[in-house]
Amino acid sequence: MEYLTVRETSEKWGMSIRMVNYYLNTGRIEGAVRKKSEWLIPYTAKSPLDIRKKADTKKSTKRKRNVNKCYMPLIASPCPGSFQEFEHSLADEEERQITRALWHYFRNEEKECCTVSEQCFNSESVQIRLAARLVHAMATVQEGDPAAVLADFKAISLENKKTSDPSAKLYTLVTEGFVSVFFHSESADLSVLRDKISLCQAGIQYYVIYAAAHELYLRREYQRAMGMAEAALMMAGNNFPIASIYLNLVLCMICMNLKDDEHADAAFMRAWNIALPEHYIHPFIEHHGLLQGQIERSLREQYPDEYNEIIESVYTFSRGWMKIHNPVSTLQVTDALTPYEFSIAMLASKGRSNKEIAKNLGISLNTVKSYLENIFSKLHISSRSELDMFVNR
């Protein structure tokens, strides 16, 4: 009999390695055998999810109508107090689950996020399923499992094709838009949401505006992107912390590209002061390179513990992100540099002089020169103009 490893089985079934291990440890995969320290699964074994779907089909050949629920409540709804207060205010169990999955994600607890979000994959609500797949994909990036990420993308795409419910259809488009911006897709186009954004809940509206501003940033339309982000921040106030963190970060990115360091500092610290009480550090991990040394500049001395956690996670997140981004992009972001080197490379690629880089990062001119020599050596290049091929836009 032909056997597969756990990883091979996860790729075949389109689910995470963690989920396969869960089914193995609960005895739900027929014929699986444990040899020494690893599991072997028969090639012909059926996925427990497929078996469940078959059983559900026998019960009813007709799919139930979508049960409309709140899409990503932690982002969508006002949340001016603590997370615990907000979670207790939710009456629906699945909305609480997806809220906790998001909370784990923003706190950089990707394993817990994956475990909780996977419990919502078979919800009767399209909104919950979409939110679960989205946050699961983003968390799985950090674990370096591209097969699981692509399985989530496939599930999101299938939701768009299957549903005819207007609300569900709206949130499939929103989710696909978030995915395209998250991975810097060269075909990203959020214009399809312009006449639909008013139908979203307020917090999702602000998050869509963040994504739209980020898309404009990637196209180097900095002034338009700035106007969108600033207007959304004025309206959001202090009621939507997650959206405000992301909006301030994209504003910081824009200001850095415009060499407006004072406003970049202010936007970054607004985001940080909102994030710190709940330890919402993952948005900073996501945007590390794009922030062009702002994390090093603002956190390295003042918040060493949080800084070290962010930088350690940047390694794993960026490598996982590149596994999805690079194969389908003309821009091949390098994995040859450390996070600190990458920040210097970003600053240099954006036209900053050695003196400006030294001032930004609080290091000596000679240190900057030494870093750039090392960066050029690692990338096998000889001039600053070539850096643009290896870093984020």
Image (spheres, rainbow, N blue to C red):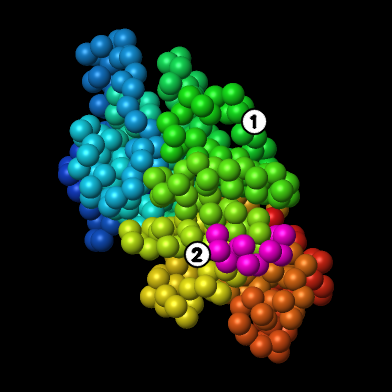
Give the image location of residue 4, x and y in percent: 36, 46
Give the image location of residue 142, x and y in percent: 44, 57
For the N terminus, the image quarter is top left
At 26% from the left and 61% from the top, the residue drawn is: 37
Give the image location of residue 181, x and y in percent: 58, 43
Q: Which residue is mark 1?
A: 191
- Label 1 crowd bin: few (<14), some (14–19), many (20+), radius 10 Å: few
Q: 387 left or right of 256? A: right
Give the image location of residue 69, x and y in percent: 32, 27
Mark 2 belongs to which amino acid? Met
Q: Kindly check if marks 2 and 1 are in contact, taking CB atoms under 8 A apart as contact.
A: no
- Label 2 crowd bin: few (<14), some (14–19), many (20+), radius 10 Å: many
Q: Earlier in the sequence, mark 2 or mark 1?
A: 1
Q: Is residue 112 above or below residue 72?
A: below
For residue 189, what is the image quadrant?
Answer: top right
At 81% from the left and 66% from the top, the residue drawn is: 385
Q: Nearer the viewer, residue 222 or 118?
A: 222
User: Could you say whether the residue bearing mark 2 is in a helix, strand or loop?
Assistant: helix
For the C terminus, the image quarter is bottom right
**Magenta residues, dominant SS class:** helix
Give the residues drawn in magenta, as a range. 257-267
Q: Which mark is residue 269?
A: 2
At 59% from the left and 48% from the top, the residue drawn is: 230
